[in-house]
Amino acid sequence: MLNKAADVIARGGVIIAPTEGVYGFSCRIDNEAAIARILALKGRAAGKGFITLCATTKDAMALIEQDKLPPATLSLMHQLWPGPHTFVLPCKDTYVGLLSGYRHTLAVRVPSFPLLQELLSRCPTPIVSTSANLSGHAPYKDLQAVTAAFGAQVDYVLPAACEGLSGPTSIHDGLTGQLLRQGGA
């Protein structure tokens, strides 16, 4: 099932995969057509941007402008990664587009969830991760419900459970240090 999910992503498809707390849509970060599909599925504005999941901190660092980060942010990232903590960080110009919501920042996470780690290790690039739901509605925590809602509109649903957090992950502003969203416990 992980090989199938990784193959669909590698070929430019969109999948639904479990995350730490909710189900999410995922695709390659370098495929604007797949990212646009996710926007359409969610009914989401293009300016919102997405979370990027990376297998390692090294992979995450390759996407961002490290010299623009305060030392405290780098220290916190190294303390909290891998884990359910997303950081909004200044990104390289290459990633300014649908992925970043046309901003010069990118939301990045290095998950510790073993299933996501294994999926990421099989994918050719980091992947997009955003909750599998209509924009403004509650994210799905149940595999049957998310499959009924979106299964026919994606290329694959990874049939596995979420890790067990009560909701989405926390989000930290990497430039100000502000906690933008408290994650599920």
Image (cartoon, rainbow, N blue to C red):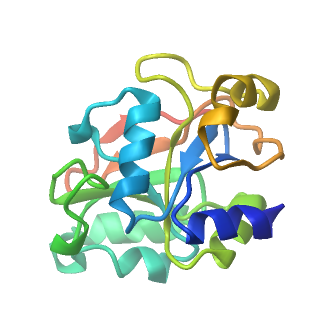
Q: Where the C terminus falls, by quadrant?
A: top right
42 or 61, nearer to the observer: 42
45 or 82, nearer to the observer: 45
> Is residue 185 among what the camera can see?
no
> Is residue 114 among what the camera can see?
yes
Expressed as whole percent of the image width and height from the top left, the position of residue 175 reads 20, 57
Which residue ends up furthest to the top in the rendered image?
A: 137
Query: Against 78, is 161 above or below?
Result: above
Expressed as whole percent of the image width and height from the top left, the position of residue 93 reads 16, 72
Expressed as whole percent of the image width and height from the top left, the position of residue 123 reads 61, 74
Quarter of the image for residue 139 reads top right
Q: Where the N terminus falls, by quadrant?
A: bottom right
Report whether 30 appears left or right of 112. left
Report whether 159 appears left or right of 91. right
Q: Please give the name of the residue rendered at 22% of the width and 68% of the height, measured from the top-left corner.
A: 70
Quarter of the image for residue 67 reads bottom left
Query: Against 97, is 126 above or below?
Result: below
In this rendering, the count of numbered labels is 0
Q: Please give the name of the residue rendered at 39% of the width and 51% of the height, measured from the top-left corner.
A: 35
Query: Against 141, is 39 above or below?
Result: below
Expressed as whole percent of the image width and height from the top left, the position of residue 116 reads 69, 60
97 or 55, nearer to the observer: 97
Q: Please give the name of the residue rendered at 76% of the width and 50% of the height, measured from the top-left corner.
A: 158
